[in-house]
């Protein structure tokens, strides 16, 4: 198992160094993908020890992750872990995800948050619980946390799968396409931190939620 961590980061200077340093002990390489941050995220990530893939123009979180996946494939990694660069995921949860992958042999391990109304902003609680139920029926498997970007997957299982997402629809695209190609899916418990409610998210609630819904239908029913 050769594991590369991929961290999309857009203007995350306050958090990125800690995320990189926290992730390093658990994987062979840490890669930060920074497309057009104006605050020096890329330099800070590199100083913290990450390999930094940079592009001058902002292209969206999924485009950044797809760039990272191509890089990891070219470097012959077998597994990829994706986690957020804004400090919402605990790198200390990575060993638990690796353990679940080893024990179950699952092709995709979803870092699943326990949905607790007290620890999650209200709108996120409802979008996550309802979203995961809808996702389970679209994917045809039990999916406990469909929007979690904290995931571990086998790269060879994506060979032959064309990923096309640019923004927040990648999580659903991967679930739908990996399940369709017969991949096994497992869950590992992870924690999520909400620094100051939703204020920091780059997600635009209405526009991005509508995008995720429409693309999910296109991935599932139109073969997009
Ligand atoms: N490279 C890159 N990273 C992004 C972009 N948009 C979001 N991210 C990163 O993706 C992660 C999750 O984004 P965030 O907006 O916090 O999503 P949320 O936590 O689901 O609300 C964070 O590390 C962001 O910095 C982007 O356009 N480019
Ligand atoms: Mg976030």
Image (spheres, rainbow, N blue to C red):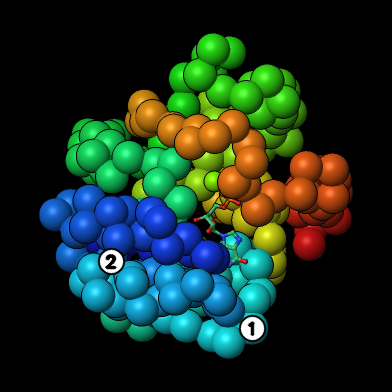
Q: Can you say which quadrant of the picture contains the C terminus?
A: bottom right
Left or right position of 110 against 29 = right
Rendered residue at 38%/54% (across/down): 15
Crowdedness near tag 2: few (<14), some (14–19) or many (≥20) residues, C-alpha within 10 Å: many
The residue carrying mark 1 is 57
On the image, the x and y values in percent for residue 10 come to 54, 65
The residue carrying mark 2 is 30
Rendered residue at 25%/75% (across/down): 47
The correct choice, above or below, for 4 with respect to 213 in the image is below
The correct choice, above or below, for 170 with respect to 118 in the image is below
Rendered residue at 54%/12% (across/down): 118
Give SS at disc 1.
loop
Q: CA distance from mark 2 to mark 1?
A: 22 Å
Residue furthest to the left in view is 25
Q: Is residue 58 at all visible to an observer of this figure?
A: yes
On the image, the x and y values in percent for residue 25 come to 14, 54
Q: Can you say which quadrant of the picture contains the N terminus?
A: bottom left
Q: Report the disc number at residue 155.
A: none
Ligand 1's quadrant is: bottom right
On the image, the x and y values in percent for residue 114 come to 47, 20
Q: Nearer the viewer, mark 2 or mark 1?
A: 1
Give SS at disc 2.
strand
Crowdedness near tag 1: few (<14), some (14–19) or many (≥20) residues, C-alpha within 10 Å: few
């Amino acid at each position: 198992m050769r594991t590369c961590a991929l961290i999309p980061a857009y203007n995350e200077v306050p958090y990125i160094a800690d995320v990189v340093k926290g992730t390093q002990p658990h994987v062979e390489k840490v890669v930060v993908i920074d497309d057009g941050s104006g605050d020096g995220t890329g330099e800070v990530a590199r100083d913290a020890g990450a390999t930094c893939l940079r592009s001058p123009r902002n292209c969206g979180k999924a485009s950044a992750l797809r760039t990272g996946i191509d890089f990891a494939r070219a470097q012959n990694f077998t597994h990829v872990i994706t986690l957020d660069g804004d400090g919402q995921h605990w790198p200390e949860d990575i060993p638990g995800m690796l353990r679940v992958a080893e024990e179950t042999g699952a092709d995709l391990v979803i870092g699943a948050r326990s949905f607790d109304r007290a620890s999650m902003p209200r709108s996120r609680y409802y979008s996550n619980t309802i979203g995961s139920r809808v996702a389970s029926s679209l994917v045809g498997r039990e999916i406990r946390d469909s929007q979690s970007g904290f995931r571990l997957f086998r790269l060879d299982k994506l060979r032959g799968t064309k990923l096309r997402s640019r923004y927040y629809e990648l999580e659903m695209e991967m679930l739908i396409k990996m399940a369709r190609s017969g991949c096994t899916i497992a869950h590992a418990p992870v924690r999520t931190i909400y620094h100051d409610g939703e204020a920091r998210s780059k997600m635009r609630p209405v526009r991005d939620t509508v995008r995720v819904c429409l693309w999910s239908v296109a991935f599932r029913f139109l073969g997009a």
